[in-house]
Image (cartoon, coloured by chain):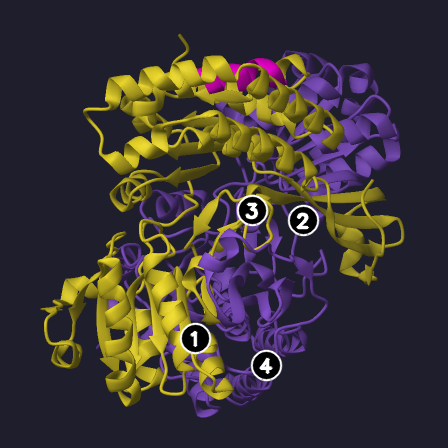
Chain colours: A yellow, B purple
């Protein structure tokens, strides 16, 4: 079996070929993959049943549910691949074109990044999603899935590799990595791997970020806030605060801390608390919130920056929007934060001042997602301050290359000559 | 005096304010700075004279020349600041706008990155250039200049801080860092600093990259190639190979290795070698090159990936464009590589296959530069595969933020409802 570095070298070699592959060729390979996944769903489900059997005593119910596949989920995988086919090829677009001088033309075009390291905990569908996105964007990929899904991952990897390589994709563009040791080795391979996309728990992503020099796209935590302003419409505030916490509490864009303007705390807090209680939410509050609600726990400092991913909410009263902004920029994780207010001046202040990847005005934090944002598919959600931020679609998997076409031009001549720097309205073709 | 972490905290605080500052306000501050630099050029030159006096025995001639300022260089600084004023404010642009549903509108707008750590060796003008670029793009900056320029840097920093803060820029947006210990501390401050821009020697940039978790924008080395194809126009090849090596050998976009197609090695190599010899260039060659030229040294493996930054050139014969591509992707640093050929098919193969930030066709590698590329000003040249690649202008100092404006919208409703995902032709204002 190939060592991790051999896999990385193969992937790097394949990535150089893949970068030159046309949209049509990539789409054909993806359609072949969609067909094979559907044709061989029986084997996929069989492999998955083995995983479920082997790990049922070791993992919790939530994880088990995410691990378990059925025909419907395989269909969703197939649909996912087909939807990637429909997305525009992000490679080869001219994003800047300028004439530097007569017959000296400069083009900036999009190109694939190279080799992507995709490391996730559980959820076998992600293997197919991310594989398809990498292929469409012309990137080779090294994949490590959750170990409880190893039979499923191996099966999916085998099908992906065979279907796409038989359709002419370069050999070795997709690589499977299985052990923790291999992941540790991957983190060292900055010579071959240009971007890591980890998906999993906070600790997991944090570990990756702290142990590699390869750039990491993703987020370690999602400590999202909803701030209910004194000028909020009460009904909207109730809907949004409920949806943000309760619609799906286990995900990164769910709210962890509810900030309530002092001016309306007496009116709003008891009403949302009634709904939260019915949903089984427990709360931790600051002094005022505890006073208003009576029977809740007092929050300690670390709670304000904790991602519960559960039916737990921090409640804090603030003296207006400025204090809300200060709290969010201090305790938040710059993921997604919302304001509920009818006052436009206050909303704009919040939007301009909150330093988060997504800022919502009168909408739930739960909208922060690549599919909902219309990106077609999502690689992940990034809280980075460079490259890509917020929900990231395929644009996060490309970078650019500069092409300068001359006719024997040399720099020495431009000690006297002037550049024309005339913008061109044409594409590199 | 403030500790490094206090400086970083101040810069972070100021960056949140600066992000909200209008283009007009920033431009006014830059014009005030331009005026002050010119009005107080006497003091700047005095401080610089002290640096020159103190370090003249410690540094080489080249470094001394770069350190030394005169009235002309101060004028260039002033012009540099004025040219940044003329650049379009890169902040607040809407790059994507889409309706998710009635009254639910999503905008993606450009925002500053936050706090930039700018660490350079020598050349005091860079302090002003980079400071102006950071201010215009709404970023706070922590600067560390070369220690041999410490009096000049301190003077420039003092003038920049006073002129801009008096014009209303947030206090502490610019911070000076002076000692090596402070730089080491800076590298740890990923909580406050979002991007590092180092400029200096290979070892210096490499050291930075290897000792921080903060993303680094830049390049460690520039091992650039010129490939002279069998179908090259001889005169163009001679001009380009000469310019790429000799026009300014000390810089990153100068050529280090000349690749020559076997088909024309006998015709081309003796001619370029005659010119190189006149310019004082020494060569290291592969077996064939040594045979053709007779009196040159044989290159060893490490030479092919060495950046000389000097009048030294590696010469290698290759069997056509494929071998040239292979050599470049193997030994190069993905900075800038050129092909000289009249054959379009060969040129396109080279352009598509060479994995470098800039690829030149019949033009010198020396064109790889932000000013020449028409970017207005340059933060640096990046060989990264993410965020920004090649010569980087102000677009490398911004990222985006997503703004979702709703009217009480919650995700739960979209379990049944469909998104409209209708592209909007409007900007966030």
Discs 3, 4 touching: Cβ within 8 Å: no
**Residue that label 4 marks:** B23
Which residue corresponds to the image point at 80% horizontal and 24% vertical from the top-left? B229
- A103 or B427, which lies in front? B427
Which chain does the numbered disc 1 sit on? A
Asked if residue B282 is positioned above or below residue A349 in the image, the reply reads above
Residue A158 within the magenta-colored segment of the rendering: yes
Q: Are marks 3 and 4 on the same chain?
A: no
Q: Give the secondary structure at mark 2.
A: loop
Q: Give the secondary structure at mark 4.
A: helix
Q: Are marks 3 and 2 on the same chain?
A: no
Which residue corresponds to the image point at 47% horizontal and 84% vertical from the top-left? A342
What span is in magenta?
Answer: A154-164
**Distance between mark 3 and mark 2 Cα atoms:** 30 Å
Residue A128 within the magenta-colored segment of the rendering: no
Count residues near mark 2 (Cα–Cα under 10 Å), then give few for <14, some for 14-19, many for 20+. Answer: many
> Residue B200: image x %, image y %?
46, 52
């Amino acid at each position: 079996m190939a060592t991790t570095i051999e896999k990385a070298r193969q992937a790097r070699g394949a990535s150089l070929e893949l970068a030159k592959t046309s949209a049509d060729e990539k789409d054909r390979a993806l359609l072949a993959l969609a067909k094979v996944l559907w044709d061989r769903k029986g084997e996929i489900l069989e492999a998955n049943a083995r995983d479920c059997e082997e790990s049922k005593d070791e993992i919790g119910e939530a994880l088990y549910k995410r691990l378990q596949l059925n025909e419907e989920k395989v269909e969703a995988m197939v649909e996912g691949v087909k939807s990637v086919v429909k997305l525009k090829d992000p490679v080869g677009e001219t994003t800047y074109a300028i004439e530097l001088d007569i017959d000296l033309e400069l083009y900036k075009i999009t190109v694939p990044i190279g080799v992507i390291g995709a490391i996730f905990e559980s959820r076998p569908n992600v293997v197919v999603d991310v594989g398809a996105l990498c292929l469409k964007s012309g990137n080779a990929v090294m994949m490590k899935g959750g170990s409880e899904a190893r039979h499923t991952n191996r099966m999916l990897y085998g099908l992906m590799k065979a279907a796409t390589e038989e359709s002419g994709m370069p050999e070795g563009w997709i690589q499977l990595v299985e052990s923790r040791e291999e992941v540790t080795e991957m983190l060292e391979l900055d010579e071959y791997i240009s971007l890591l996309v980890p998906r999993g728990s906070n600790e997991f992503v944090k570990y990756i970020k702290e142990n590699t020099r390869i750039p990491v796209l993703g987020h370690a935590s999602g400590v999202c806030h909803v701030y209910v302003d004194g000028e909020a419409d009460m009904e909207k505030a109730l809907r949004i605060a409920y949806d943000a916490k309760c619609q799906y509490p286990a995900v990164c864009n769910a709210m962890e801390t509810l900030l309530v303007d002092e001016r309306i705390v007496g009116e709003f807090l008891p009403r949302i608390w009634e709904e939260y209680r019915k949903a089984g939410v427990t709360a931790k509050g600051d002094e005022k919130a505890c006073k208003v609600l009576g029977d809740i726990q007092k929050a300690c400092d670390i709670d304000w920056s904790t991602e519960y991913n559960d039916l737990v909410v921090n409640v804090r009263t603030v003296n207006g929007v400025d204090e809300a902004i200060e709290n969010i920029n201090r305790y938040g994780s710059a993921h997604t934060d919302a304001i509920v207010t009818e006052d436009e001046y206050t909303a704009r202040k919040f939007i301009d001042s909150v330093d988060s990847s997504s800022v919502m005005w009168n909408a739930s934090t739960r909208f922060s997602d690549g599919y909902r944002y219309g990106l077609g598919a999502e690689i992940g959600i990034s809280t980075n301050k460079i490259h890509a931020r917020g929900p990231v679609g395929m644009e996060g998997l490309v970078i650019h290359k500069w092409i300068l076409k001359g006719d024997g031009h040399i720099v020495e001549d431009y000690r006297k000559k002037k550049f024309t720097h005339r913008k061109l309205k044409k594409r590199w073709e």
